[in-house]
Image (cartoon, grey):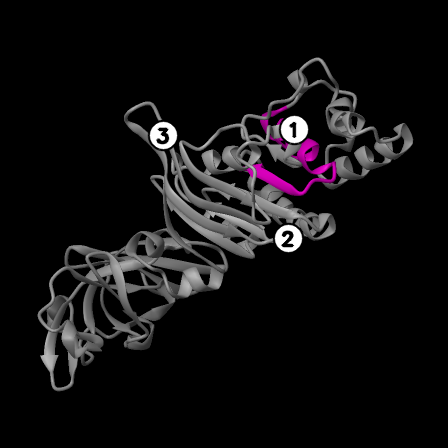
Amino acid sequence: MYSFRDVHKRYGLRTVALRRINLDIETRDFFVLYGPAGAGKSTMLNVIAGITKPTSGDILRDGKSIVGLPPEQRDAAMAFENYALYSHLSVGENLGFPLRAKGMGKSDAEDRVKKIAATLEIDHLLDRRPGFLSGGQRQRVALGRAIIRPADIYLLDEPIGHLDAKLRHRMRAELKALAEELNATVVFTTTSSREALALADRMAVINEGRLEQVGTPRALYDSPANAFVASFVGDPPMSFLKVEAVADGDRARLVGHGGRTLGRAAAEMAGATGLSAGLRADAIRFVDRGEAEAVPARVRVIEHLGYSNIAVVDVGEDQLSVSLAADSPVRPGEELGLKIDADALHLFKDDVAVASGGR
């Protein structure tokens, strides 16, 4: 297990890359660091690998500090976002370099190179040099060089970010299968919600060097800790409506645009300020505008996804995403009503989650 203990990383006087990170990465986890560009994901990988030292705090491996260990003694294999290939070596030589450095026999090394190259669909490029490859091909070579040798931990920094959509989809499945075959710990960074949810055993959402939430993909999707996580996990992300909590017996009634009741909350929420209701696209459906408690809305655009559609609708000053069947007759410009599943509503106060499921 790898553990961050109060890890802080500062560059100069003003730039803070990591802010007191406390995190455990379990052995043989496929662990995803997910967040926007510049959030600190690559810095976390560099700290584990020993390329960067934390300004303060500690990194533990199975309970023992590794901060003082040089990179070559950490048994970590890393795929860099900027490829870092040897330009004077062929693809085959780049892939085989880590194996030769470990003293693997020539025949075994060649077999391993061919297997990894076939998996990454670069077996026809083994004799080429990196300068004659596309960006996506170079990225696959860099990924192959990282995963080709046995290691205690594999650190993959957006390793499929530059691939086309078709190959990226296939490589997600291949990476998950490779991780199980390697039987090692994998830490993978991405800015793609779909990629994070598809690959992770557990994941952490990072923002501006802060650890926002850690858990399984399902836990982060179903129970986001704050509005940032809610708006970042999921495709489409969670939408938000401003609401007021009005006292109503032993519960508070959540009132949204047009005075419609959206759901209920604990009595102590009555009169609270800074409230918003978070809604997933599949928690909302269109109804007749005149139906009781229907929230009035106007359809702005329809996003066609092939297997389904997403309608983006205006509700007062807010916008919501609504899931639709692919053959739905709803069109842009229509004024309709929205019916909200109160049991799927998430309540936030000052962007911090306070309740979900209408509770």
> In the figure, is residue 286 to the left or right of 270?
right
Q: Residue at x 88, y 35 (%)?
A: 108
Under mark 3, the amino acid is Arg
Distance between the alpha carbons at the discs numbered 3 and 1: 24 Å
Report how far apart the C-alphas of labels 1 and 2 lie in the structure.
Answer: 21 Å
Where, by quadrant of the figure, is residue 345 drawn? bottom left
The crowd level at tag 3 (other Cα within 10 Å; few <14, some 14-19, many 20+) is some
Tell whether 216 sits left or right of 359: right
- Mark with earlier residue (1, 2): 2
Residue under the image location 31 percent in, 51 percent down: 228
Magenta range is 134-160
| Residue 346 can be seen in this image | no
Q: Report how many numbered discs are placed on residues in the image.
A: 3
* Residue 339: percent from left, percent from top: 27, 74
Taking depth in this image into account, of 200 and 284 the one nearest to the observer is: 200
| Residue occupying image coordinates x 67% and y 18% | 86
Q: Position of residue 70 (x, y in %)?
A: 60, 28
What number is the disc on residue 336? none
Left or right position of 190 against 185 = left
Q: Earlier in the sequence, mark 3 or mark 1?
A: 3
Tell me residue 26's x, y (percent): 57, 54
Marking on residue 28: 2
Dot 3 falls on a residue whose secondary structure is strand
Residue at the disc numbered 3? 10
Q: CA distance from mark 3 to mark 2?
A: 30 Å
Out of 68 and 293, give the one closest to the viewer: 68
Q: Which residue is mark 1?
A: 72
The one nearer the camera, 71 or 234, is 71
